[in-house]
Image (cartoon, rainbow, N blue to C red):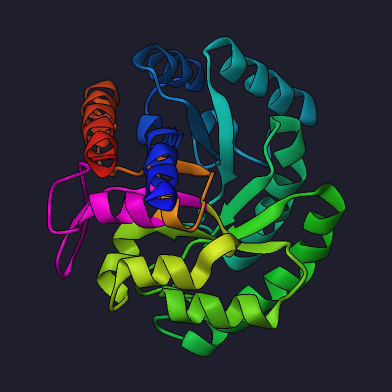
């Protein structure tokens, strides 16, 4: 009973973040003010945002953004760069550049993903391995964890592939950003995936998800049992962020962020029962 009580208490201390990619049509300063005002604990700074492009930012710019987060009452939960729209060389340059800025943001998690496996799966995996050979030594020097996000259709598409990659790259610099909605689509059991990945989970993305449909929904919508997910994260003593990841919200991101936070708080409250 004592162990269960401790786990339920930990559910109640889960920190909720929001990805700034949803505000890509708004100035980043506005996004921070909105999210801080709503009561979010932190943000994932997405370097695809026009105000945060890695090729344009200096370390001083990154430090000022970190100060803006703090002024809004927000932690920098993570920094990410999902450059699906860029060619391999530009993507690699900007990813390396983004990694170098992470300490200036005051963060220690840098989220990336693999390339699409169509039309050339071998090339996608080769590109990922070459990128990791470049990134991991730098990450170790910076004290940053490279968190790969498994996603359907990409190199590293599911938790089993992620586990194999982690086992092949010991040393602690490589981790996983577990998008629980993606895992719901690709894995036999999300909660078992959480247990399998364990302490290698550096960060999570959370959203609702319907069975067999890759569409990010408000937490609690669809078929994914987020109450069970929260309880399992507490079970493995995960202390990172649950960062809400919603797409196609740029026309009214504040409304979506409001609804998502309310829904996630309800789920966490239910997970404690």
Compared to 4, does 106 lie above or below? above
Q: Does the magenta stretch include residue 223?
A: yes
* Towards the viewer: 1 or 118: 1
Compared to 153, does 224 lie above or below? above
| Side of 14 relative to 129 (left or right) | left
Residue 260: quadrant of the picture:
top left
Where does the magenta region start and end?
203-232
Q: Where is residue 222 in the image (x, y as percent from the top left)?
A: 12, 54
Q: Which residue is drawn at 16% across and 70% down?
A: 212
* Towards the viewer: 62 or 245: 245
Compared to 168, does 190 lie above or below? above
Q: Position of residue 150 (x, y in %)?
A: 45, 67
Q: What residue occupies the far front of the structure in this picture?
A: 1
Q: Where is residue 217 in the image (x, y as percent from the top left)?
A: 19, 47
Q: What residue occupies the far bottom of the structure in this picture?
A: 122
Q: Residue at x 41, y 24 (%)?
A: 40
Q: Which residue is drawn at 34% across and 48% down?
A: 206
Compared to 7, does 114 lie above or below? below
Q: Where is residue 88 in the image (x, y as percent from the top left)?
A: 60, 67
Q: Does the magenta stretch include residue 257?
A: no
| Side of 66 relative to 23 (left or right) | right
On-image quarter of the C terminus: top left
| Side of 253 relative to 32 (left or right) | left
* Towards the viewer: 267 or 181: 267
Residue 100 appears anywhere in the view? yes
Residue 127 appears anywhere in the view? no
| Side of 15 relative to 135 (left or right) | left
């Amino acid at each position: 009973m004592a162990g269960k009580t401790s786990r339920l208490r930990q559910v109640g201390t889960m920190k909720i973040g929001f990805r700034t990619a949803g505000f890509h049509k708004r100035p980043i300063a506005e996004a921070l003010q909105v999210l801080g005002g709503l009561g979010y604990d932190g943000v994932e700074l997405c370097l695809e945002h026009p105000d945060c492009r890695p090729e344009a930012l200096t370390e001083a710019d990154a430090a000022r953004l970190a100060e803006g987060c703090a002024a809004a009452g927000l932690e920098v939960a993570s920094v990410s760069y999902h450059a699906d729209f860029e060619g391999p060389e530009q993507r690699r340059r900007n990813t390396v550049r983004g990694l170098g800025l992470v300490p200036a943001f005051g963060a220690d998690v840098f989220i990336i993903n693999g390339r699409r496996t169509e039309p050339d799966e071998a090339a996608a995996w080769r590109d990922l391995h070459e990128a990791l050979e470049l990134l991991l030594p730098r990450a170790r020097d910076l004290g940053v964890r490279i968190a790969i996000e498994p996603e359907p259709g990409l190199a590293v598409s599911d938790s089993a592939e992620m586990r194999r990659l982690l086992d092949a790259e010991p040393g602690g610099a490589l981790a996983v950003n577990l998008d629980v909605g993606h895992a719901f689509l690709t894995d036999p059991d999300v909660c078992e995936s959480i247990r399998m990945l364990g302490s290698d989970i550096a960060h999570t993305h959370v959203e609702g998800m319907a069975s067999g449909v890759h569409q990010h929904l408000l937490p609690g919508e669809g078929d994914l049992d987020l109450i069970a997910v929260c309880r399992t994260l507490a079970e493995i003593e995960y202390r990172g962020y649950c960062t809400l990841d919603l797409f196609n919200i740029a026309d009214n991101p504040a409304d979506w962020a409001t609804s998502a936070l309310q829904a996630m708080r309800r789920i966490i409250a239910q997970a404690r029962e």
